[in-house]
Image (cartoon, grey):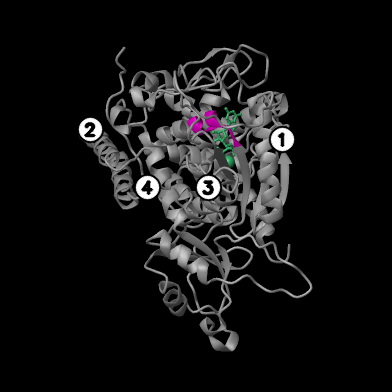
């Protein structure tokens, strides 16, 4: 059956200027409301959607490009007094430099990408193994280096004023202040995405760390690859998110080759194990050991091999990333591709996900510690489902994406059909012109009143279904449909989520929350309003208690919260 969705996509990155003007236009149209203005607004949305469509590439193409860049790159620990010009001149002896940047993480580091991998080989050839007194080194050579040439360091011990790229997220109070100065809730949401999303440099660094790990793994399995998945590449990652890595052994040659029907042939003799899980566990165990013993900069290595999805967890100090290395995790790779596709179809998807994730984090709905909390992955599924339930829907269902798939998209993993279209150009969106402001408020309302006790969230069908089991929150795993991705969530956490949605839904409908506060001078003050007000601590009494509660004025509440926030921020506290 033909899908009602035809060609269009709306990816915002790199179009910030255009979108800013678009939102100014939107604000203007809302003020001077008229049917012509509404029509122009809809046309503007459609045009921007189509403009964006032409620049979006399939995830695997992007991954391959980044992987190649990473293979031509080195990571160098520098001194704060390093002279950039001399440093680059020194490195250029080995070949042309494509790109470089500096950042700080337990010291100053430089990522340098050469034009060719021969340059990296030449640079490594000229590097020396350190001689240390009282200690010995493991002579494992990697592309993580120290800059030791003192002639490159400026005299006088002064810092050289190198420009460092931020690799961490903006502190919440600063973020609240920043978005409070915006003129509309849409601009606030876009500004929040801008401030939180992974930067070009951070993305390069993530691929470089995978590439450094790949150098260790290929010592055993020369044809294996290590690629990032999850929020590092699905478009929803924020600075500081963990680095999920996938060790892929499927590319090893000879795996799918058939024995000839006649004549002689040779087969590899190989160790056998009882299950694929046992093979994964033994490979991760050995690689985890190598990372621990030989991997420069890798600390706190834990082998968590009995988890549902076995993994090796460690900190990569030079990048500051918390890393999770998994193997044989192809379904997660497909989920990553799916989220990437959804995020690229319409810019509102990413903005809403970033705002909701930030809101959930500040209110303790999500946490970096494993437990009964709702995960970011589940929360993203909830946003996607909500967007599928709009009228008309903003994004297609997974079943519709499956119908649009071509032969090259076919993917069956462990008996699960993970097929869906990868070509953005084949997906046509319906004409929904709701603003981000409307969507944010509607999201809270939708989940404030959702019948969680009876219904399941299902992005495959884009419709509520009866719950097949009695977990408090049921979100269907899109590719392993017998599984619930939010099985870990308990009643208390779900109740908190619902209560916060109710509170935020109410707050977002109050005119005083909706309008930017003006000071007497007419300029916007930093008084939190709109999205910023929703990021301040909220009073949640639980569902039953809330019904009895007499509400105080939103503005009064925000004022008192502001005072407490200011107190928290003050240097004396
Ligand atoms: P962050 O919180 O920013 O790290 O988001 P994330 O999307 O990277 O989540 P996480 O690190 O927990 O998981 C990495 C990826 O694994 C996700 O993006 C999904 O693709 C997949 N994943 C996580 N949890 C589940 C789950 O419960 N079921 C399935 N099928 N996949 C999951
Ligand atoms: Mg992650």
Q: Measuring from the top left, give residue 219's x and y in whole percent.
A: 59, 49
Query: Ligand 1 quadrant?
Result: top right
Q: Quick one: label 4, few (<14), some, or many (20+) residues within 10 Å?
A: some
- Depth-wise, is mark 2 or mark 4 nearer the camera? 4
The reply to whether the residue tagged 3 has its Cβ within 8 angstroms of ligand 1 is yes
Q: Is residue 564 above or below residue 446?
A: below
Q: Quadrant of residue 347?
A: top left
Residue 381 appears left or right of 305: left
Q: Which residue is mark 3?
A: 238
Q: Measuring from the top left, give residue 346's x and y in whole percent.
A: 36, 35
Residue 228 appears left or right of 72: right
Which of the two residues, 147 or 156, is positioned nearer the viewer here? 147
Q: Secondary structure of the magenta portion, mostly?
A: helix
Disc number for residue 501: none
Q: Measuring from the top left, give residue 12's x and y in whole percent.
A: 36, 44
Disc number for residue 305: 1
Query: Which quadrant is home to the N terminus?
Result: top left
Q: Quick one: label 1, few (<14), some, or many (20+) residues within 10 Å?
A: some
Query: Dot 3 lies on which element?
Result: loop
As for residue 54 lying within the magenta part, the answer is: no
Q: Quick one: label 3, few (<14), some, or many (20+) residues within 10 Å?
A: many
Highlighted magenta segment, given as a residue range? 327-335
Q: Which residue is mark 4?
A: 13
Q: Which residue is mark 2?
A: 39
Mark 1 or 4, nearer chain start? 4
Q: Quadrant of residue 72?
A: bottom left
Q: Quick one: label 2, few (<14), some, or many (20+) residues within 10 Å?
A: few
Q: Measuring from the top left, give residue 320's x and y in whole percent.
A: 61, 56
Q: Is residue 117 visible?
A: yes
Mark 2 or 1, nearer chain start? 2
């Amino acid at each position: 059956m033909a899908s009602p969705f035809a060609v269009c996509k709306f990816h915002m990155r790199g179009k910030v200027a255009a979108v800013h003007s678009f939102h100014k236009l939107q604000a203007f149209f809302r003020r001077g409301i008229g049917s012509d203005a509404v029509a122009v607004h809809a046309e503007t949305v459609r045009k921007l959607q189509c403009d964006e469509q032409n620049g979006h590439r399939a995830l695997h193409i992007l991954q391959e490009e980044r992987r190649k860049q990473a293979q031509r790159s080195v990571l160098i620990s520098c001194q704060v007094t390093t002279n950039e010009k001399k440093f680059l001149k020194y490195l250029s002896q080995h070949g042309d430099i494509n790109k470089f940047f500096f950042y700080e993480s337990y010291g100053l580091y430089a990522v340098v990408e050469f034009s060719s991998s021969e340059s990296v080989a030449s640079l490594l050839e000229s590097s020396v193994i350190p001689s240390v007194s009282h200690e010995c080194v493991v002579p494992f050579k990697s592309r993580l280096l120290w800059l030791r040439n003192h002639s490159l360091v400026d005299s006088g011990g002064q810092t050289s004023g190198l420009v460092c790229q931020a690799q961490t997220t903006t502190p919440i109070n600063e973020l609240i202040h920043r978005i409070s100065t915006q003129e509309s809730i849409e601009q606030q949401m876009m500004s929040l995405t801008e401030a939180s999303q992974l930067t070009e440099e951070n993305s390069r660094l993530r691929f470089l760390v995978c590439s450094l790990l790949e150098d260790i793994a290929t010592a055993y399995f020369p044809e294996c690859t290590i690629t990032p998945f999850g929020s590092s590449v699905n478009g929803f990652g924020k600075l500081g998110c963990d680095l999920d890595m996938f060790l892929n052994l499927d590319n090893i040659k000879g795996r799918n080759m058939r024995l000839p029907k006649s004549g002689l042939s040779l087969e590899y003799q190989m160790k056998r194990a009882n299950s694929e899980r046992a093979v994964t566990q033994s490979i991760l165990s050995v690689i985890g050991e190598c990372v621990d013993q030989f991997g420069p900069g890798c600390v706190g290595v834990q082998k968590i091999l009995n988890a549902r999805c076995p993994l090796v967890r460690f900190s990569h100090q030079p990048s500051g990333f918390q890393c999770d290395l998994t193997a044989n995790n192809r379904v997660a790779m497909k989920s990553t591709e799916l989220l990437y596709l959804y995020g690229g179809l319409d810019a509102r998807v990413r903005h809403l996900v970033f705002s909701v994730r930030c809101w959930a984090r500040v209110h303790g709905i999500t946490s970096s510690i494993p437990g009964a909390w709702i995960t970011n992955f589940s929360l993203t599924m909830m946003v996607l489902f909500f967007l599928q339930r709009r009228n008309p829907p903003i994004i297609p269902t997974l079943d519709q994406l499956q119908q649009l798939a071509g032969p090259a998209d076919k993917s069956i993993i462990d008996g699960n059909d993970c097929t869906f279209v990868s070509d953005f150009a084949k997906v046509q969106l319906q004409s929904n012109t709701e603003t981000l402001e409307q969507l944010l408020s509607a999201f809270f309302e939708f989940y404030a009143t959702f019948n969680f006790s009876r219904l399941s969230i299902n992005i495959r069908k884009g419709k509520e279904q009866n719950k097949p089991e009695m977990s408090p929150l049921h979100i269907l795993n899109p590719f392993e449909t017998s599984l619930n991705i939010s099985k870990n969530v308990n009643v208390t956490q779900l109740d908190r989520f619902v209560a916060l949605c109710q509170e935020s839904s109410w707050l977002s409908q109050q005119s005083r929350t909706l309008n930017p506060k003006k000071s007497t001078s007419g300029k916007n003050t930093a008084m939190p309003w709109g999205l910023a007000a929703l990021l301040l601590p909220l009073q949640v009494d639980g569902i039953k208690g809330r019904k009895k509660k007499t509400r105080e004025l939103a503005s009064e509440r925000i004022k008192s919260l502001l005072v407490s926030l200011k107190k928290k921020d003050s240097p004396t506290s």
